[in-house]
Amino acid sequence: MGSFQFRMGDEVSGLPRGPTVKKCVKLAPMHHATESGSVGPVVEQFADFHEPFSLASGQSLSGFTLAYETYGTLNADRSNAVLVCHALNASHHVAGTYAQGPVNLGWWDNMVGPGKPLDTREFFVLGVNNLGSCFGSTGPASLDPATGQPYGSHFPVVTVEDWVRAQALLADRLGIAQFAAVMGGSLGGMQALEWTIAFPERVRHAFVIASTPRLSAQNIAFNEVARRAILKDPDFHGGDYYAHQVVPSHGLSVARMIGHITYLSDDDMAQKFGRSLRDNGGGYRFGFEAEFEIENYLRHQGEKFSRYFDANTYLLITRALDYFDPSRTTGGDLARALEPARASFSVVSFTTDWRFPPERSREIVSALIQNGSAVNYAEIDAPHGHDAFLMSDPRYHAFVRENFKQLRAQI
């Protein structure tokens, strides 16, 4: 039977009870994090692949490049490698800083580094930028070798399955036959799940954090509204805006605003902004400029995002989110879809995450237990909504740290 551990609460509805439950523990709040230093300055690397790469859509790329970074040292038998998969707007820059821009901190720097939950003194960590992205790997803004012009609207739709197969090719290139762990939050958690299905013998442990086995109709709806904002921007030009030297910044900004709302909890928004007005006088202006602090915050986030992210990439990644559903080929039976998995699992959810709520993580846990897989599950009572997986909650980090400690003992 699979093992199951629950932390930060007494009851989890919908999960098996009895002999499948190995241990139920309530973690007391911790007041001091134990994270240590940063990995320091890092250098991004690039791997070129010149063979045709077939995609799930039936299309193919004649070749492609993957941007990646590594932290720590690969041991002699190459058994301590951990792959970190990124979410929608992140990249291969997981930890550390770039020498030319020390404020450019890796997106999961609080998780990865010496003395941190994923300790680079013990593990060799690999971060890969996915196909279709705009941070160094081949994507819509890259030059199509057939035309010498940016791919633009001609870049094929990519899926989570495509990303995982491309990551496997990079692992081959680096001589990593098996990962000690594959880890990711949100969309990164989907990739970790797919790794255990597509390459079961190449993953010993999977960390699936703030994720889901499939998007709900509501989530697909949010993605569609965001995409329509981009597609209807006059500067989009059918996806070929590069040739016009413009950016569909208005549509991309609105898309980001929509997405950002889903990443925060109502309580978090209320605490940070409430109904505070920008005008200290407290009176309404009776117009449509940003009067409330939350409006100003969302506009700022949207405009900032539109300056560094690519609109075509946003379309591709949100569609990849929509398409992911391992149980689509098993009649909706997630346990059957996960049957190939041989890894043990750590699954984490957050109580205020309404984008990918705990119910979705429990669904994954239930399916794994049904298959007899070893599972550790933590449901963290945190106020930050979906973005909690990026935060330094000490209870969350303690759970991840303990699971890596157990994994380290097996190497």
Image (cartoon, grey):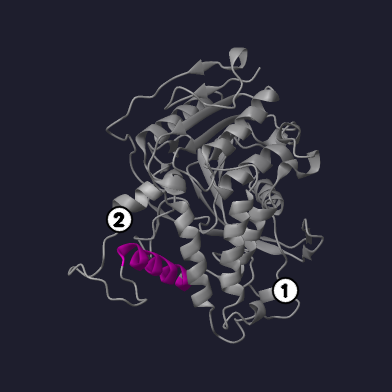
Does residue 12 appear in the picture of this structure? yes
Q: Name the residue furthest bottom.
A: 244
Viewer-closest of 402 and 316 = 316
Residue name at image x 28 percent, y 33 percent: 32
Give the number of callouts: 2
Q: Position of residue 251 (x, y in %)?
A: 53, 74
Q: Position of residue 382 (x, y in %)?
A: 39, 39
Query: How much space separates mark 1 and mark 2, taking CA atoms?
Result: 44 Å
Q: Position of residue 357 (x, y in %)?
A: 52, 41
Circle nearer the N terminus (1, 2): 1
Q: Which mark is residue 154?
A: 1
Amino acid type of the residue that numbered disc 1 sits on in the rendered structure:
His
Viewer-closest of 44 and 318 = 318
Magenta: main secondary structure? helix
Alpha-carbon neighbours of circle 1 within 10 Å: few (<14), some, or many (≥20)?
few
Specify the segment rendered in magenta.
292-307
Does residue 46 appear in the picture of this structure? no
Which residue in the structure is indicated by mark 2? 274
Viewer-closest of 4 and 411 = 4
Q: Please name which of the two marks, 1 or 2, marks the residue nearer to the observer.
A: 2
Question: In the figure, residue 196 lies in which quadrant?
Answer: top right
Q: Is residue 37 above or below residue 105?
A: above
Q: Is 370 on the left or on the right of 404, as rendered?
A: right
Residue name at image x 42 percent, y 44 percent: 388
Helix, strand or loop under label 1? helix
Q: Name the residue furthest left.
A: 281
Viewer-closest of 26 and 332 = 332
Q: Is residue 388 above or below residue 241?
A: above
Residue 359 is covered by the magenta coloring: no
Amino acid type of the residue that numbered disc 2 sits on in the rendered structure:
Gly
